[in-house]
Image (cartoon, grey):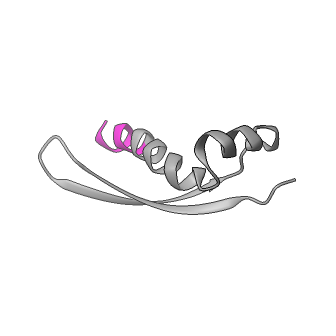
Amino acid sequence: MLNQSINHEVCGFVMKDLQMVNISLRVLHRPDARMLPSMYRQLGIDYDDRVLPSICNEVSCPVCVG
């Protein structure tokens, strides 16, 4: 079993009434161990720093704005 990683992501976006909102998220993730070799080859060892910010932004924005 792999250790879980914790990332802190900060995302900001503008609400419908033009207020700026900053949200800090604590993301706990554990990748599928079978997929790690291909993830490392395609995205690099720092895949979480490259992928998680965009995922957090895509998920948190509709939840907060909606």
Query: Is residue 59 rendered to the left or right of residue 36?
Result: left
In the foreground, 52 or 50: 50
Q: Which quarter of the rendering shows the C terminus?
A: top left
Seen at 41% across and 39% down, the residue is 58
Residue farthest to the right, as pictured: 1
Instruction: Specify whether residue 27 is painted magenta.
Output: no
- Region rendered in magenta: 60-66
Tell me which residue sits at (48%, 42%) in the image: 55
63 within the magenta span:
yes
| 5 or 24: nearer the viewer | 5
Q: Which residue lies furthest to the left in this view?
A: 18
Where residue 61 sits, quadrant-wise, is top left
- Which image quadrant is residue 63 in? top left
Res 10 quadrant in image: bottom left
Q: How many numbered markers are drawn? A: 0
Residue at image coords 59%, 56%: 46
Rendered location of residue 47, percent (x, y): 59, 50
Q: Is residue 42 above or below residue 2?
A: above
Looking at the image, residue 14 lies above or below residue 23: above
Left or right side of 51 for 29:
right
- 19 shown above or below 17: below
Foreground residue among 1 and 51: 51
